[in-house]
Amino acid sequence: MTTTWYRLAMAQNQYALSERLIRAISGWTMNPQDTVESLIAEGADINRTHGTLLPLHCACMSRDSECVKLLLKSGAEVNRVDGYERTAIHYAAEKDPACLCVLLENGAEINCRDGNYDTPLHWACFRNNVECAKLLLEHNALVDALDFNHDTPLSWASLKGNLECMMLLLEYGAETHTTNCNGLSPLHRACSMFALGLSGERDRQCLNILSQATGQIDLRDHKGEFPRVINDDSELKAIITGICCSPRLLRQLCRYKIRQSLIGGNRQKLMGQLPLPAPLQRYLLFQNGE
């Protein structure tokens, strides 16, 4: 009986310490004397899940890179999974490049998957966190990683109208012809955003850059019909008809093939190594508006 009571008391104490640690990291502490350092010294388990939360993940959500360093130095497992089947790098990729840097320096798995098979790059692009997305790509994140629905980071960025991340992904050679389990490509996603009419010129720019990067494409089905989201918007239908129903210029098709032939890395840097005239390099990099 004494042993059982002792075990229950220890479990209760650990649970209380765990909760206090989560609160201290998140800035919700009710006791000003509770600091991350003092609670670790008191015996808080930094790898214990409290509900669905882990201390390291909370530090990333709070954008506290110094706390991330402290937890890792104290033995936090960098690739440990929380109750949502996510690792700390998934949260850092959404939130903060400083936290992301610390995690990468400490062995975080850059292409790890969460419960929906999403990578950190998917989340960085969903939030349009260009700095984090660039950092991931510079560390060889898979630019065309597929999630559970077979959507790529470019598809996520297109779905949100995140122009800056779209440009970055294309700079690193993201494929524009991929389709998900429902047959939707990044261009389909961009059309859906355009039809909502929330961002105006920005949505037009997203459509434009994808059409430039895609080469020849046709969004019509086997009956020759466009998806309803396109048919129901006369302006969008006119734009997409021009893209799909007219042969692309030879120079546009060549641009697509040249860009796809440059394997790996930043296209802008790779292009700079080619013996090409500056105007042609600008065309290949979508820098002249064509």
Image (cartoon, grey):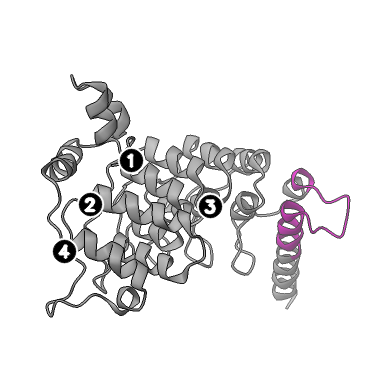
Label 1 sits on residue: 289
Q: Which residues are magenta?
A: 16-38
Secondary structure state at the residue bearing disc 1:
loop
- Looking at the image, do the residues carrying marks 4 and 2 touch, with CB atoms under 8 Å apart? no
Categorize mark 3 by other alpha carbons within 10 Å: few (<14), some (14-19), many (20+). Answer: many
Ranked by sequence position, the earlier of labels 4 and 3 is 3
Residue 137: name its quadrant.
Answer: top left
- Looking at the rendered image, the disc whose residue lies closer to the viewer, 2 or 1, is 1
Place of residue 243 in the rendered image (x, y in percent of width and height, measured from the top left): 22, 59
Place of residue 30 in the rendered image (x, y in percent of width and height, measured from the top left): 86, 60
Ranked by sequence position, the earlier of labels 2 and 1 is 2
Place of residue 3 in the rendered image (x, y in percent of width and height, measured from the top left): 70, 71
Secondary structure state at the residue bearing disc 4:
loop
Give the CA distance from mark 2 to mark 1: 15 Å
Categorize mark 4 by other alpha carbons within 10 Å: few (<14), some (14-19), many (20+). Answer: few
Q: Is residue 185 visible?
A: no
Amino acid type, mark 3: Glu
Label 4 sits on residue: 245
Amino acid type, mark 2: Thr
